[in-house]
Image (cartoon, grey):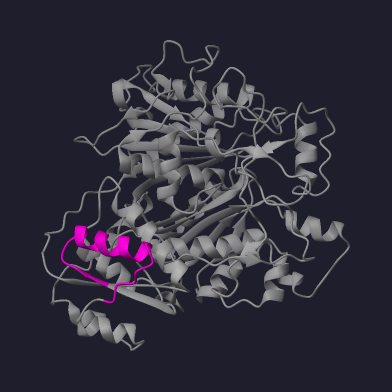
Amino acid sequence: MTDDDLAPIAIIGMSCRAAGVETPAALWDMLDKGERRFSPVPEDRWHGLDPGIDLPAPPAASLLERIDTFDARFFGIAPRMAAWLDPQARMMLELAQHAVENAGIDPDALSGEPVAVFVGQFMSDYRERINARGLADSAAFPGGMTAFSANRVSYQFGWTGPSMVIDSACSSSLSALGLAVQGLQHGAYPMALVGSPSVISNGFYANTAYRGGALSPTGDSVPFGSGRNGYVRGEGGACVLLKRLDRAIADGDPVHAVIRAVGSAHNGRGGGLTGTDTGSQVELLRRTAAAAGRSVGDIGYLEAHGSGTPSGDAVEVAALAEALTGPDGRTATPAGPGGKVWVGSLKASIGHLEAAAGLMGLVKAALVLRHGRIPRVAGLTEADPELPIAGTDVAVAVDDVVWQRGDVPRLAGVNSFGLGGGICHVLLEEAPVVREAERRRPYVLPLSGQDEECLAELAGRLLAELDGPEPPDLAAVARSLQGGRRARERRAVVVAEDLDAFRAGLYELRAGRVPDGGEDPVARAWLRGEDVDWEALWEPGESRARAHLPGSPFRRRSHWFDRRPPSPSAG
């Protein structure tokens, strides 16, 4: 095995979407508050729903408010094509746009580059719904094909690297991540985008899953709780932009977290056709840690698969406890707070996003490392006493747990298990600390959107990012805003010497008062729509570091194949 085989991979861009969530900052705010985003499924939302069992109440799920809306104009897609395009492919375009912008890169600047695209996806409810209505259109030829969730992204941005959809059921997104990481380590491409969408618009899968006992009949199953009785479905998705860590640092890319290893395997016959077993998980955990030159005990937090099924949760914590024991039979003290490996599950808050669940868990784990806190499992006051963790170094996070930086980089694990036996595990390390020498001088910070409402929304998202635990350097923010996104129709400019001055300008913009940059000639020229040489504002040799910033707001409108979209969700 060469050093390249073990090369760490940086997450330089990140985006996500879930019920009431449009940005990673909003996801963390939900976790910080311990909220659970569940509501009854509208009657026509899951077309053809017939659970085949008596439910005590209407099915519950964690749903996006609307699944018929999309900003086709933003992507230059004709309304007819948008109407027949699978909402999951639409979501992937939006997630990809935001992940690249979050890295401080204008997607247009990568046109023609061999950027790879890997998407985890395993269902196409939209196609099922169209077929049930007996309708067809030539636009549905590409719009309904699963492959286009990846291929459309590559086409949209002009990327020439590998482009494919990976299906391993609920572990699809981390299976896709593993392939992307392997290609980056071997130098097959310079960057890779990995994403996964999950949008539910048809009842077929739910009908079979209810009958098979996988779904919670009550819709109120909390992972690791004593009353768990199956999983609750969720909608949303996540996307990450990846690059080798050494290249990312050299290029001034911001880094959310570092992927040290990704392990993928299958249970064989262990656990049956649709389950998993302890032995397979133990082997995966140990093998993945060894590939990174670490041990399972180095993990301080595990974002568990944690689906809320009675046997699944128990097997997962038992496997973690067993994996902590080394080949010599000795158990080292884990690296988590209080000498424990803490366990949590995002599914308690937004349900099981199925194909997208693993990647969404990765986003959460990166936020845990950044914020230095393990959030409690939402809705859980006490872990099930029957879980096999008594006397072990495994603990379920029923309260928030502080997890500060130390002398050794903190390490988190992420699990994702597929219905058909495909299992994945990721080792995620905190981002290296890169401190830039701050310089106090005026920086030109351009902002743009499709209209004034978009500008105000962007200002609000930027303020949320600046209020995080580690606010970015103003120079890095300026670099990202100047060269990291396409200039849109409505423009504003803030000229500021420090973050407080920038915040003041953003508050003005959020309130509807558009700052114009004063008498700065470059700002005035950009506001007039002229081309500006932003690089001329920087001194030779000045840092090229960029910052993580939220993506451009979208103006979504309804696009649905028969113009009869399902009712909005209350969640």
> Which quarter of the rendering shows the C terminus?
top right
The image shows residue 52, relative to residue 172, as above or below, that is above
**Residue 183: where, in percent of width, then height?**
45, 59
The answer to which quarter of the image holds residue 313 is top right
Q: Position of residue 103 (x, y in %)?
A: 36, 62
* Residue 564 in view in this figure: yes
How many discs mark residues in the rendered view?
0
Residue 495 within the magenta-colored segment of the rendering: yes
- Identity of the residue drawn at 60% across and 68% down: 151
Residue 551 belongs to magenta span? no
Q: Residue furthest right?
A: 134
- Residue at 64% across, 32% down: 231
Q: Locate residue 406, reporting x and y percent.
A: 21, 34
Q: Residue at x 11, y 59 (%)?
A: 437
| Quarter location, residue 129 | bottom right
Name the one closer to the observer, 500 or 274. Answer: 500
In the rendered structure, the answer to whether residue 386 lies left or right of residue 80 reads left
Classify residue 59 as left or right of residue 493: right
The reply to whether residue 7 is in sight is: no
Say which quarter of the image contains residue 119.
bottom right
Q: Nearer the viewer, residue 320 or 25?
A: 25
Residue 561: where, in percent of width, then height? 76, 66
Vertical order, 125 against 151 (above or below): above
Give the left or right position of residue 434, taking residue 69 as reference: left
Magenta span: 494-516
